[in-house]
Amino acid sequence: MFKAIGVVLLVTAGVLGASSAAQATSLPVTTLTGFNNASGVAFSQDGSLAFVVEDDDGTMGGEAAIKVVDSQTLAPLSERIPAGVPGAGVNHAIVMAPNGTKAYVSLGAGVIKPFYPATRSFGPAISLGTSGIGQVVFSPDGTKAYAAVTNNGSGTLVKALDVATDTVTASVTTCGGPDGLAITPDGAKVFVNCSDGTLAVIEAGGNTVIHSFTPTGHLQGTTITMAPDGANLYVTAFSIPSTVTSVINTTTYGIEHQFTDEPKDAAFNADGSLANIFSASSGDLIPTNSTTFASETPIDVMSPSPGEWFLIDKNPAADQYWISGAHSVFVVGTFTMLPNTGAKSSALWFSGMGALALLVVGAGFVRLGRRTS
């Protein structure tokens, strides 16, 4: 267990009866601190566990690692689990297989490593490049995975892997510096967001590039998120003056809409009706209608932090959005009962508008506190 002595959750009258109209209608926000460059979150299949990747151990070029967190109590459940590889330094550094038995973690030194949630251990490194690895995605049936080989922006390859054997089965030349990846729900197309600003489309059956273009204003591609129905793709890139996210039709490749208020990353709710877009310049998570693209009431997550990169991951079994970046992870959402856990429901967690609830878990690496402004 962790050597620090206390995980504290504070719930005050200012939490539930927020100080502004915007806060009164927003989901609760809890801040987990004490991470070393948190760079992505993945979840167990039932949503009860969160696996948070740290890029390093707090030292220059230090080891990347995973920390396991109970997604309901937010209590730490493990020490750092080192990957044995220098800092990751990439976006979306972890992805869970559809059946929950294996995750892939993108690391420095051009490798990814399988991570096994059941034993909380890493498997042997899979060498794919010479420098960083960008996003990794699994095919919907979990038999294949695709990894973006970035090599500090000079790479051109997306590599396909056989998940059962952790071996490379194909190398696809796509663009300058592939980074973000997304796959359609039917597994037919893999979209590649590239650091040269282009968006490439791979036909997964033959591992061939069937289309490539540069969305308006995209200078350097970063993250990419697929809508649950596969109809649209949210593609983020550096632009002028900051970042832009383009909504791309996955059939026509046309631009449906563009968001320009410094979006960093996006995650959809379960039915796909809302795209939750995080803006670092405002510190807000902005629920956005995925049909009309109209913004709803922003959720105040943190103080504005322009220039910092933040990534959003949705708990598959709960109304929770985990926003990771720098030394914090922000959990936005409610704490509903999940299968196979003894976690309390949100009704018990947040009973009493004027109450002060203090939970001491006993061992932990984070201080949990609610934003009140």
Image (spheres, grey):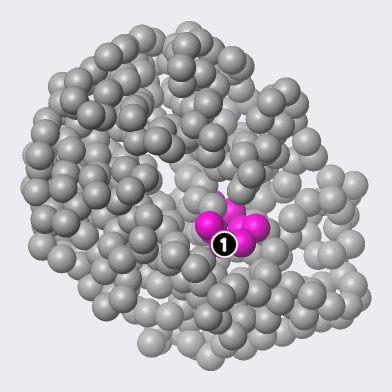
Q: Is residue 144 left or right of residue 312?
A: left
Q: Position of residue 371 (x, y in %)?
A: 72, 60
Q: Is residue 370 left or right of residue 143?
A: right
Q: Residue at x 25, y 44 (%)?
A: 145
Q: Residue at x 26, y 55 (%)?
A: 104
Q: Is residue 96 left or right of residue 132?
A: right
Q: Residues within 10 Å of mark 1 (few under 14, many from 20)?
A: some
Residue closer to the observer: 167 or 124: 167
Q: The residue tagged with tag 1: helix, strand or loop?
A: loop
What is the three-letter code of the residue carrying label 1?
Answer: Ala
Q: Residue at x 32, y 43 (%)?
A: 139
Q: State how many labels appear.
A: 1
Q: Position of residue 142 (x, y in %)?
A: 30, 51
Reply yes or no: does residue 319 show up in magenta: yes
On the rendered image, what quadrant is the C terminus found in? bottom right
Q: Position of residue 358 (x, y in %)?
A: 72, 84
Please provide the residue range marked out in magenta: 315-323
Reply yes or no: does residue 242 show up in magenta: no
Q: Position of residue 258 (x, y in %)?
A: 59, 18
Residue closer to the observer: 325 or 25: 25
Q: Is residue 174 above or below residue 339?
A: above
Q: Is residue 178 left or right of residue 131?
A: right
Q: Residue at x 78, y 60 (%)?
A: 372
The answer to which quarter of the image holds residue 77 is bottom left
Is residue 301 something one can see in this rendering?
yes
Q: Is residue 125 above or below residue 364?
A: above
Is residue 153 something one can see in this rendering?
no
Q: Is residue 155 above or below residue 49?
A: above
The answer to which quarter of the image holds residue 266 is top right
Residue matched to label 1:
317
